[in-house]
């Protein structure tokens, strides 16, 4: 087993891939994925295994906790920060389906910056936040907006199958202050914005969240959608692009296809 680290300030791409032997954790090297011992070691430790560039990508981490931020778009600074929980079972990777239940009504996809934690974090000070972050990836905070009026705790609003696509990989270095976000549905640009328009930034959010609960390695915080949302229905294809983080693509499918036909 060997250990290797990039030059200071150079971003690594970390991911999880599907292999015949099961999921593997990898780092991008040149033109291929290389196996690593863990996402969370202080230095990347190579296993010596290599994998093709087109190996199927999974969600880049396995969170125990997924947190989203409510009212964190343009103009929301007048309201206090407010978080909501999403089931870890909603996390899926690129190309996995977002599954809609026609009985829940309208659904939006939301393109967001997602932060992945490196270590246990509790009561972080602002200067401690960068050291608690492993990296950044694309998050899609799928939301059943048709249920909002009936579900103030956001349980059925946020927890459908495939309601948190993540990926395609984690980037360990990113200037998160002004990252452009684009949301396309079926190849048509439906929304665009920037993390510069978030009411509360990465530092503020992680200070707030760690003040009320313990976060851990691999946990994910969705930073909020600065106007970057679009409605979807079964049969659609969603692509969310963040500058410096690539594109996350997911199809939209129906939980009960026959019910969709009956309601059409």
Image: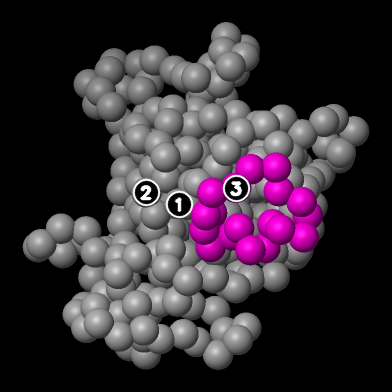
Identify the residue position indicated by label 2 in the image: 62
Q: Is residue 104 left or right of residue 97?
A: right
Asked if disc 3 and disc 1 are in contact, CB closer than 8 Å, the reply is no
Secondary structure category for the residue under label 3:
loop
Kindly indicate the quadrant of the structure image that contains residue 98.
top left
Identify the residue position indicated by label 3 in the image: 121
Which quadrant would the C terminus be assigned to in this image? top left
Q: CA distance from mark 1 to mark 2?
A: 6 Å
Work out whether mark 1 precedes mark 2 in sequence or the reverse, and give the earlier one.
2
Report the front residue among 52 and 125. Answer: 125
Of the numbered discs in the image, which one, if any, rests on residue 139? none
Residue drawn at x 39%, y 58% is 60
- Above or below for 208 versus 169: above
Asked if disc 1 and disc 2 are in contact, CB closer than 8 Å, the reply is yes
- Crowding around mark 2 (Cα neighbors within 10 Å: few <14, some 14 to 19, many 20+) is some
Q: CA distance from mark 3 to mark 1?
A: 11 Å
Q: Is residue 126 magenta?
A: yes
Disc number lying in front (2 or 3): 3
- The image shows residue 237 at horizontal and vertical percentages of 39, 50
Residue drawn at x 19%, y 80% is 49
Instruction: Determine the residue located farthest toward the top in the rendered image.
Output: 150
Q: Is residue 58 magenta?
A: no
Secondary structure category for the residue under label 2:
loop
| Colour scheme in use | one colour
Report the front residue among 6 and 234. Answer: 6
Instruction: Determine the residue located farthest toward the left in the rendered image.
Output: 20
- The image shows residue 256 at horizontal and vertical percentages of 25, 23
Disc number lying in front (3 or 1): 3
Identify the residue position indicated by label 1 in the image: 218
Q: Which residues are magenta?
A: 116-134
């Amino acid at each position: 087993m060997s250990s290797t680290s990039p030059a200071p300030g150079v971003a690594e791409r970390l991911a999880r891939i599907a292999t015949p032997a099961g999921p593997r954790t990898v780092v991008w090297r040149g033109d291929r994925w290389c196996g690593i011992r863990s996402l969370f070691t202080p230095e990347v430790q190579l296993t010596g295994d290599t994998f093709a560039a087109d190996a199927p990508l999974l969600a880049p981490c396995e969170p125990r906790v997924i947190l989203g931020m409510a009212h964190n778009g343009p103009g929301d600074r007048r309201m206090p920060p407010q978080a909501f929980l999403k089931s870890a079972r909603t996390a899926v990777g690129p190309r996995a389906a977002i599954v809609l239940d026609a009985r829940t009504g309208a659904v939006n996809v939301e393109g967001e910056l997602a932060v992945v934690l490196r270590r246990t974090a509790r009561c972080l000070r602002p200067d401690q936040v960068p050291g608690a972050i492993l990296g950044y990836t694309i998050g899609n905070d799928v939301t059943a907006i048709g249920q909002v009026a009936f579900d103030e705790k956001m349980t059925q609003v946020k927890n459908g199958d495939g309601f948190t696509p993540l990926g395609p990989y984690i980037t360990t270095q990113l200037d998160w202050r002004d990252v452009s976000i684009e949301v396309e549905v079926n190849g048509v640009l439906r929304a665009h914005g920037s993390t510069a328009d978030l009411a509360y930034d990465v530092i503020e959010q992680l200070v707030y969240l760690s003040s009320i609960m313990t976060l851990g390695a691999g946990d994910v915080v969705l930073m909020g959608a600065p106007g970057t949302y679009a409605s979807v229905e079964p049969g659609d294809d969603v692509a969310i692009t963040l500058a410096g983080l690539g594109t996350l693509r997911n199809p939209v499918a129906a939980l009960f296809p026959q019910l969709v036909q009956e309601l059409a």
